[in-house]
Amino acid sequence: MKTITKSTCCYCGVGCGVLIESENGQIIGVQGDPDHPANFGRLCTKGLTLAQTAQSQTGRALYPELRLSRDAQRQRTDWDSALDTVAARFAGIVQQHGPDAVAFYVSGQLLTEDYYVFNKLAKGLIGTNNIDTNSRLCMSSSVTAYKLALGADGPPTCYEDLELADCVLLAGSNMAYAHPVLFRRLEAAKAARGAKWIVVDPRRTDTAALADLHLQIQPGTDVALFNGMLHHLIWEGLIAADYIAAHTEGFAALKALVRDYTPRMAAEICGILEADLIQAAELFGRSPASLSLYCMGLNQSAHGTDKNLALINLHLASQQIGRPGAGPFSLTGQPNAMGGREVGGMATMLAAHRDIQNPEHRAEVARFWGVERLSDIPGTPAVALFDALKSGQIKAVFIACTNPAHSMPDLNTVREALQTAEFVVLQEAFAHTDTAAYADVLLPASSWGEKVGTVTNSERRISRVRAAVAAPGEARHDWWIATEVARRMEMLLRPGLPTLFPYADPESVFNEHRALTVGRDLDIAGLSYALLEQAGPQQWPLPQGQLHGQARRYTDGVFATASGQAKFHATPYKPLAEPTNARYPFHLLTGRLRDQWHGMSRTGRLPQLFSHTPEPSLSMHPLDAERRGFKAGDLLRVSSKRGQLVLPLQISDEVSSGSVFAAMHWNGQFLNSGGINEASIGKVDGKSFQPELKHAAVRVEPAELPWRAVIARKHPDVLALQTLLQPLLAECGYASLSLQGRDVLVIRAAAKTAMDDWLARLFTLIDLLPGADVLEYRDARRGLLKRAGWQDGALSGFVFAGDVQGSEALLNSLIDAQAWQGPRLAVFSPKLANATPRDKVVCNCTQVKASQISGLLQTGAELEEIKSTLGCGTVCGSCVPELKQMCAKAVTA
Ligand SMILES: Nc1nc2c(c(=O)[nH]1)N[C@H]1C(S)=C(S)[C@@H](COP(=O)(O)OP(=O)(O)OC[C@H]3O[C@@H](n4cnc5c(=O)[nH]c(N)nc54)[C@H](O)[C@@H]3O)O[C@H]1N2
Ligand SMILES: Nc1nc2c(c(=O)[nH]1)N[C@H]1C(S)=C(S)[C@@H](COP(=O)(O)OP(=O)(O)OC[C@H]3O[C@@H](n4cnc5c(=O)[nH]c(N)nc54)[C@H](O)[C@@H]3O)O[C@H]1N2
Ligand code: SF4
Ligand SMILES: [Mo]
């Protein structure tokens, strides 16, 4: 029988409601929940393909694993042994070296209930504030700025404001890719009401391409821009003097500072036209309602807090806050970054928006939990945490639901830290992440579709997460694992006392968390699982006696500071932490792709999600490439002071001259290196401790890897094949692995000299050995070796090594599942070399390709006709920004 379960998408902070369709314990489909107020039924490419990512158990962590010594392999074990070992090792280190010798590194993708238990385990039971999360890499600058300026964390705005704003300032946000369903709402509002969009981004992203005004600033110059805009507002009398006087503090000092930031001076720092800066200020200041939407382009900076504060200054000064359609709206990245902040699950905060440094707050929480005291020693934030592991100051780390060996800056340091640590625990849903290689204990976690609890989205809305199916193998829920470890640890650390972790289910955890919020700015005393069941997702605050949460905060001009007044902060512009120089002349920018999620442990399981961007690349402006004699596809070595990696070149005028861009997703599972964070910098913001992941100075030079190979294999279980082949990647000078078509695995490899032994092992693994239906072409003198295999009369795979010309055409016929047309021998024909390269899939839902769209454009068709003829852009809409760009280009061409 088919069952429908209401739950929430596990990807981004939009927090879309999903309806999971399941049958016989299998998830068989996913649809948008028409009743969910975040998406009203819409989903993007990632949400729509969730069911396919959940269908195979291949690659999942299915049972606990343990290794007895560093040199040994992990072996399967039972839950009791795994949990006892973790508890004993942690308790032992705490008893010997004190509570601050251990640390937890958790994730904004945990549910609120999971997070709560981990936080209590660290701060309540062990007595250390050493619990930090990947939100440090993501939201901490926003958190810090909200607290400094408005007195409390959390956006004052709601999603309806997207529809009510007349001017939308998108700063450091590629919303078309990163928050697609909200972008659909914004597009609809633009079409309906003509809202004006200003996009501030050093790249011309799909978001920027649709803006009324794109300010393509020099990387890291946002503070100068916002200061310059404020200068103009003050000069032109576009500020709300009465509001400033009645509801804010600190304006005089800010005014004195921005006096120097004339539009001309600011525009010069930003590398934009003075007129454009003025136009932006005019639009922002004169619009009845101005909303800013901002994300990692502001937060991931050594001056991220100042970037946030400078933007909030603009809102406060012009009273673009506390009104419908107006306000500084920080878009949260992960599905439950907000929930993590609510339970205080970070090194710099306590439960329910309380502060570690506040003795009353510590006493309140200690009393509530029934422990003697909480530590007043600030915890170590993410980057410092891994530094302390490396230096031996922290000896053991418990990592849950994040992959630091890929996502942290400066991977050489992170790997060394994990190598040096005495004890590493990893709680993961998927068995093969880059961090898994370092785990002494692997605890298999249940994941999306299997878990139960709550998450809070970007607009402070709490939604239920429900289970449609049971977890595979012996995987267990995150809250349960944390609770079990805690109970075993308390028997060692406080024997004989009643348990601090009396939880029977996630609901009992939620109820305890709720009680801690009473009287706080995020009070949810009126909320319960029952109310969520009855009335659907709710925003906080929702105090006792209310039936619905609050859509907007600070509407009365009273802020959450001690005085009730919002605070201006004078934010001088500071240059990048690592400016370019003669040795490292390029700015490296990093960011996201449309259809991949972070380290790809889920999205990288689905060939369909590779079709928009099949290969990793480094984007460079055509002029920079030409000046250096680089051609598209050249393998380039990208090096910083900290590390290096090799990437193929993509020539693109989306980046400006002097900058290069790489996506953050590719890692050791798909590359011979750990990905772009080999080169990134661990320098952090002094207030938020968020690292500068968006910028580093790099050098780019030819990688000099003349030997090439292309390997492609059709396989009924490509995930299993991927697990087999992945270890081969690291041996190459360059290698990338991707899934294509429906069931084809592709490896592109390069090296300094021929890799004969490597090839021999590869042939065995992919089963292209002579004896089967295999054709071989060898030319020892020219170092060529080509093999192609057939199964049931159809081409099933090939390897081209030494000379890869013609491999693209052959790959096309393998991917498109056409039987090989010509005579068998022709697969090695040099004539194939001139075949056109693979056509990019623009629309993921309908698999419509770029050539089909271009074909129609040439006949003069416009957007609506293209959509209705080909069907592209009519399902999830994620490709509509790109379609619009293609149409616009066709008109100007
Ligand atoms: N498809 C997809 N969506 C996602 C995610 C994903 O992995 N994949 N991850 C989610 C998460 S956790 C997050 S945090 C969000 C991130 O969402 P976004 O922040 O929107 O995405 P990014 O691509 O990381 O960065 C946004 C933009 O910042 C620009 N930028 C770089 N430097 C600067 C600068 O100095 N100033 C300004 N103004 N802009 C700059 C980059 O060019 C980039 O286009 O996405 C969420 N949504
Ligand atoms: N250069 C560069 N680096 C970046 C960024 C950037 O823009 N540029 N962005 C940064 C940002 S904003 C973020 S948020 C981070 C994200 O970085 P990570 O947190 O490392 O990203 P994920 O790959 O999403 O890691 C989540 C892990 O949890 C596992 N998992 C999934 N579901 C569950 C579950 O239910 N339970 C458990 N226990 N595990 C589960 C997944 O398999 C996955 O391995 O990356 C940061 N790193
Ligand atoms: S916008 Fe896409 S990824 Fe984000 S929650 Fe909605 S469906 Fe999931
Ligand atoms: Mo993030």
Image: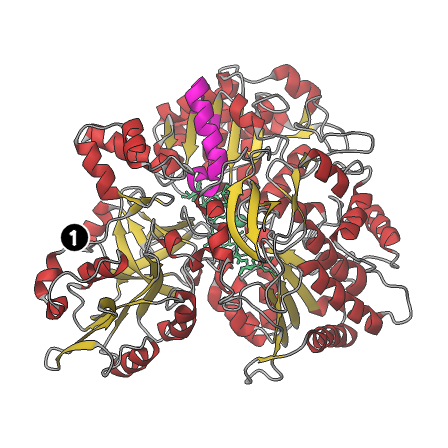
> 531 or 271: nearer the eye?
531
Residue 205, above or below 470: above
Q: Does the residue labelled 1 lie within 8 Å of ligand 1?
A: no
Whether residue 332 is visible to the viewer of this picture, yes or no, is no
Quadrant where the C terminus lies?
Answer: top left
Residue 666 occupies which quadrant of the picture?
Answer: bottom left
The kind of residue on which mark 1 rests is Thr
> 773 or 581: nearer the eye?
773
Residue 804, above or below 861: below
Q: Where is residue 511 in the image (x, y as percent from the top left)?
A: 80, 47
> 738 or 321: nearer the eye?
738
Q: Does the magenta stretch include residue 194?
A: yes
Q: Where is residue 608 in the image (x, y as percent from the top left)?
A: 38, 53
How many other residues sit within 10 Å of disc 1, few (<14), some (14-19) or many (≥20)?
few
* Residue interval drawn in magenta: 168-196
Residue at 43%, 49% in the rendered image = 591
Residue at 41%, 48% in the rendered image = 595
Residue at 74%, 61% in the rendered image = 122
> 353 or 42: nearer the eye?
42
Q: Mark 1 points at which residue?
A: 836
Q: Position of residue 849 (x, y in %)?
A: 27, 44
Horizontally, residue 21 falls left or right of residue 661, namely: right
Horizontally, residue 106 falls left or right of residue 187, namely: right
Q: Does the magenta stretch include residue 215?
A: no
Q: Position of residue 19 (x, y in %)?
A: 57, 43
Whether residue 460 is visible to the viewer of this picture, yes or no, is yes
The residue lying furthest to the front in this view is: 1
Q: What is the secondary structure assignment of the residue under circle 1?
A: loop
Secondary structure mainly formed by the magenta segment = helix
Residue 399 occupies which quadrant of the picture?
Answer: bottom right
The residue lying furthest to the left in this view is: 831
Residue 621, above or below 835: above
